[in-house]
Image (cartoon, coloured by chain):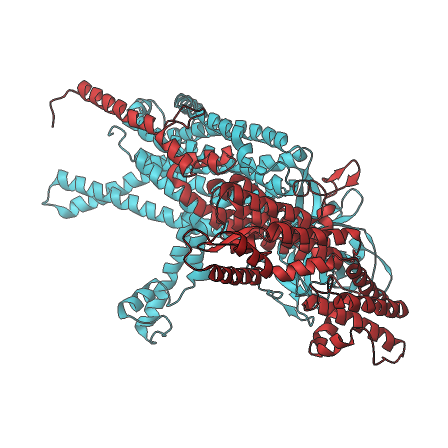
Chain colours: A cyan, B red
Amino acid sequence: MNDYDPKAFNWLFAFQTWGIVCGLMFLGAVLLAFVLQVLSHTLQEFEQIGPGKPRRSLFQGLRNGCAAFANGVIEGFRDLFFMSPRRVGAITVLVFRESVRRKTLLVLVVFAICFLFAGWFLSDPNRDPLLRIPIYVTFVLTAISWLILPAVFLLSCWGLPDDIKARSLHTVVTKPVKRSEILVGRILGVTLVGTLVVAVMSVVGYLWLVRALPEVNGIKTRVPVFGEITFLDREGKPTDKGINVGDINMFRSYIEGDTAARAIWKFSGVGPSLLNKDGKLVLESKIQGFRTHKGNLERGIIFQYTFVNPTTNVRAKFQPFEIAEFRDSIKPIDNDLIDEKNHPVKLMTDIVDKGQLTVEVACLSTGQFLGMARPDVFIRAQDAYFVASFFKAVLCIWLMMFLIIVFAVSVSTIVKGPVASFLTGVIIVLGIFGRDFMQQLVAGEGIYKWEGGGILESAYRIVTHMNPNVPMEKGFWTTVVQVLDTPMLMFAGHSRAIIPDFDTFQMAKFVAHGYDVPWNSGLLPAIMHTLAFLIPCVILGYFCLKSRELESK
Amino acid sequence: MNNLTSHQRKMVYLVGMGLLFIPVITLGFPAAHSKGQSGGALAQMRQEHDLGESTLGNVDPSSATMNLVLLGLRGPAACMLWVQMDKQKDAKDWAGMRATTESIIKLQPHFQKVWQFHAWNLAYNVSVEWDSVKDRYFWVKEGAKFYRKGSQRNEKYPELYWYYADTLGKKIGRSDEWRQFRRFFRIDPDTARYTVNGVPGPDLDLNPKDEDNYAVSADWFKETNRIMDQYGKEQHIMDKSLFRSYPGRSTIDHASSLQKEGHFDEETREIWNKAFDYWDKVYGQETWYPAPYIGIHLSWDLKQIQQHVETTPLPEGYKGTKKQYELDLRSWVARYQNMTNFRYWRDKCHSEGQVNTVQAHKELYDALKAFANGDTQEAERLAYEGLLKYEKVLGDDVSGKGLQDDDLAIEEGMLGILTWRSARELTNKQIPNEFPLRNMWLAHQNRLKEIEAEFRRRISPNRNN
């Protein structure tokens, strides 16, 4: 959590991206389906009427194709929106039994073996709890996700193709069962098995954690309220960032001690609900220090909070204190403060301005620096229970599992087991390891900085051996190439969204470092991510299954 | 392709498998547990070439299991972990980095450079990333413990023992935070964990007998030499003659540190004498073979070399005369003594172990301290008395032998004169033409600027060391 900056879920951006990607996908699918329908009906008409009357064949083919397409769409949506819970339930139970028969629950044995020997591989029991808790918590949550994902992945990818191959699905579809019910029933069946396994693993994992780390019992997790950060330079002028002291990690920037340099945090929504039981506002910091000279080794670098009301210009200083690097530096702030003119002021009424609290941080040690980033100072709201945070993290693992099941089952409606496994496997690997790379590639960030224009321009440069630094000659064709490049790059950018971002579901980083899993930047994105894939996957999966000849192996 | 039925083919495969098992079992038979049993050929070869887990050191079951279950993927897994560790270090994820380090070491338990890299990383690179000196000490201990663990896993190899001793000695005793670290070595700052019967004490993993860090370091350097003698394994850190000197060097550092901290008592003198004894009677008596037929002791002087040549026959196969042999010995002894600075350290230990030397040091130290505290009169008095004693010490054949040309001794004398002169100047007193160590003062005027800077540093109120 040293360089993790949780961002609130951006509804507008999320829906916009989802709408564009799904819209384009559906548009493509609808067009494809329409063309195929019209083509197949036209060919049929050609066969029936004969080659002598092409216009008639074409007209009738088009008419019949359109009708068949419309019927298909209407029937499809009827199937999707009006499913029988009883039939879906029956299929779910069937899939559950089949999964148990396939010894899926054996994964629990592997889990048990992992936990029996975990103590061998984890850190020294005598180590500082501060270092042990993250390792143990991460181990438990990682073990759960790594064990459950392959199991449900295989079940989901192979279940439907195996049923088709064994013709057992043939007997099902002869009954009055809709294809949508088969699809949803299978998704729910595998999910039920997965849920059972995750539930057992998480409860056992939690109990193991409490036994291995008795200090976990009773600890609470922080509920941080983050603000926005701005900086003042050493002369007191506003600046985007502080100083770069040469730290390889660029997450933080630094302010110089004993100068006018400040880091200023603005917290919104500050009200009585954020006060603790004693009526104090708790500020926690993770500020890091950088010494340009040894200074007093017995003392840490000193810093100070100043609470400011920008409207009335009331400024109240809090007593200076030493930084506590990589530890919790918690300061409960009393409501009664003394301002710079020595007048008593109230934090919540005189300083907090329309729910907004401004906190300036200054380094008081001459020649020393303080490194800060946005999440380094936060208001600590009422703490949450560790167990609640742990199970929120488990819920996110469950959501990830559900997403993989939905994806894999949908894919398995159209391709055979090995292909479905390969495709889903690639999606998982890309989702876990490739998202950052794709993001940098599409955005032209980091080492993937764009040079030499977009796709077409680059192609032109390659063919003509033109250096990326040489500007293109101005003219009609350059304009055409550059205009066409823009939508192509947008397309590439949005194509990235087809791959799920599995990092969204990784909540171990919060729980392991003593934070509650936040709603707005943790759970909500995970839920929305799952829903964003659920809807198109089910629709596409249904139409794929509907169009498939189940009699063929 | 052939006329065998499926059943017959299966039987052939079965027999083939059975036959293949014979060499596998024979070769892979476990090592013999008692005399008379030969064990498997592979086990014997492992034993012979020191390749078995148990022959290298303590076996860590988790390490062995991990290497086994990874099959041939140990290399890629180790590479991935190294990359991960580096990223965690850059992101200052210390808990994660520490855990990854443990995993790496489980995959590479007998790769000494890996142990050395990680231990150094923890003790030196990670520790400086923390602002609090207590936190820094915690990471220095982590590094030292890592060396210790490495030496247990590779118990026949002296290098990790040496690094462990070196960390306890030099890292704790010479870094910027040496005052705090040396104090923490006796009373660990983590009092919640290291308090026994209500008395805060040391981290018993590192300092079980509650001793000075240099004393513990010297013990471990001795252990390093013992391991080297017992198993006959070479080290690749430095020349053997220097490598073997470290128990003595550490004892010298121990005594020097005590003086630096202002301890000029009988204990300090005893440690100097202990250092002298080790240097002269243990290290000086070790036999070195720098060239064919040549065996020398570092403690030899010309007379002893002559006596040795006279009393012992020429080595078998040596083609020169007795005179030539003596010249060879003299040449090699001088060369080795120069290389190890043997005579300097021996004389210094001897001089520092004298009562009058300790007293002179004490008075000069106290004078500087009194000056720093603003007591100029006392500073002047103590400095003058100290200088008188120091002049006597340097002029003495016994105590002065090891100090006359010693840079530190000159610095100390010059500082003493500077203290005395400054104290007089502050009280508007004339500086007389004659004063103790006047010759030294005049001879080393070229060093005055440097000595004045040191003087100012020592009397500064913000002084850290």
The extreme left residue here reads A52
Give whichever of B356, B459 is nearer the camera.
B356
Left or right of A382? Residue B89 is left
Q: Residue at x 69, y 78 (%)?
A: B446
The extreme front residue here reads B310
Tell me where residue A255 sits by quadrant: bottom right
Give whichever of A489, A479 is nearer the camera.
A489
Residue A526 % position (x, y): 52, 42
Quarter placement of the C terminus of chain A:
top left
User: In this orientation, does residue B335 appear?
Assistant: yes
Left or right of B166? Residue A430 is left
Q: Is residue B82 above or below residue B256?
A: above
Tell me where residue B242 sits by quadrant: bottom right
User: In this orientation, does residue A325 appear?
Assistant: no
Residue A241 % position (x, y): 61, 65
Residue A352 % position (x, y): 75, 56
Residue A121 % position (x, y): 53, 36
Q: Is residue A254 above or below residue B220?
A: below
Q: Is residue A63 above or below residue A343?
A: above
Q: Residue at x 67, y 55 (%)?
A: B252
Give whichever of A547, A157 is nearer the camera.
A157
